[in-house]
Amino acid sequence: MSGDNLTAVLHKTKDLRLEQTPIPEIADDEVLLRMDSVGICGSDVHYWQSGACGHFVLKEPMIMGHEASGVVAKCGAKVKNLVVGDRVAIEPGVPCRYCEFCKTGRYHLCPDIIFCATPPCHGNLARYYKHAADFCYKLPDNVTMEEGALLEPLSVGIHACRRANVTAGDCVLVLGAGPIGLVTMLAARAMGASKILITDILQSRLDFAKQMGADCTMLVTREDSEAALVARIHQLLGEHPDKTFDASGAQATVRLALMATKSGGVAVLVGMGSPELTVPLAGAMSREVDIRGIFRYVNEYPIALAMVASGKINVKPLVTHHFALEDTLKAYEVARQGAGIKVMIHVQPRDTNNKQKF
Ligand code: 572
Ligand code: ZN
């Protein structure tokens, strides 16, 4: 094993550096991974640009990266599910396993969860990284390392759709055509939604969403009144949406979600926005619109993997930009500019660990 462990460390706001760190020592229930693909999430850009995301604040230098895949380089003595050479997707949140939430299956709500690249926990944008073996999922040969990394955002979309109870024949509205809006759309389609409208303020994103399978799109401009937008949504869909997802976090879209959803339907708030919003709550309440939040995902990695491996969901087109680990700063700059959808960092040359050539 080479001693090179080039690692992307965020020291403080706008101070992201590539530097050598020690190769981690593993415990009996852990694996050492030679990292392969690591996607950039909106939160990574937030930490880099402002030192915070939601109530998580960067206080110490932190290794970036949580949308990742790697190859098992070493197994702890008690690891039974993996062997050296296995290609794996890494579920980045490892909970305590003992608390009420862990024991009742909602481990994502564990207050002591260790989640990659969420202060004070380090992430996995490095040549080597260690992880709990049971939060690593072996990839079948027909799944690429990039798809393995994309299981992370896809799990968010699947979780959002499960929280909404998306079911066969559902009419779905997705507000926001960024990465999270798109994975929510893909998950909703795979779970049986028959009609999906996606909205955004950028036509380029809507064109992309259309290519990815949206039935219809709606461009939102500053000039549009709220009432006019709700009317247009209903007109474009030909009905009121059973399930609405706000994948933007902006007050304007959360308001639209509550107003546009069918009476008795569900509005799921997926986007990360400001902590307090002014919304027309009484109207939604009196129409029995269920408003639900989501926090990451739980038990969804195996579902995401099954959907990708079986070809039911195609996440590959989401990756619009590729960079080598050595060019991490360039990759972050492209992600910050928001021109593409998903920026992927290749810790090893692209395709090194893919079994089939695509
Ligand atoms: O990939 C999932 C994911 N979740 C993140 C951050 C990055 N990536 N979350 C952290 C922030 N929270 S939050 O504090 N918030 C709504 C701002 O609850 C959501 C999950
Ligand atoms: Zn993320």
Image (cartoon, rainbow, N blue to C red):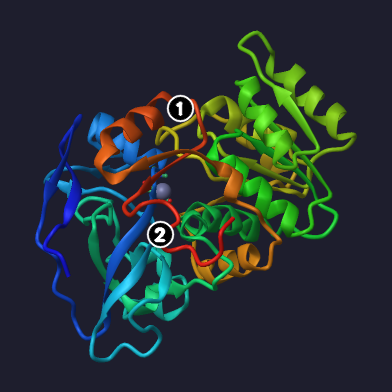
Ligand 2 within 8 Å of disc 2? The answer is no
For the C terminus, the quadrant is bottom right
Asked whether residue 272 is in view, the answer is yes
Farthest residue toward the right? Answer: 238
Asked whether residue 267 is in view, the answer is no
77 with respect to 83 (left or right): left
Q: Nearer the viewer, mark 2 or mark 1?
A: 2
Q: What amino acid type should be assigned to the residue bearing mark 1?
A: Gly
For the N terminus, the quadrant is bottom left
Q: For the point 64% across and 61% down, which residue is it?
A: 162
Q: For the point 38% across and 79% down, which residue is it?
A: 134
Residue 51 in percent (x, y) is at 22, 35
Q: Is residue 333 above or below residue 83?
A: above
Q: CA distance from mark 2 to mark 1?
A: 28 Å
Q: Earlier in the sequence, mark 2 or mark 1?
A: 1
Residue 278 in percent (x, y) is at 52, 28
165 with respect to 277 (left or right): right
Determine the secondary structure under disc 1: loop
Residue beneath label 1, please?
Answer: 338
Residue 131 in percent (x, y) is at 28, 70
Q: For the point 24% across and 85% down, which residue is it?
A: 76
* Residue in front for this viewpoint, 278 or 75: 75
Q: What amino acid type should be assigned to the residue bearing mark 2?
A: Thr
Residue 326 in percent (x, y) is at 25, 42
Residue beneath label 2, please?
Answer: 352
* Residue in front for this viewpoint, 283 or 166: 166
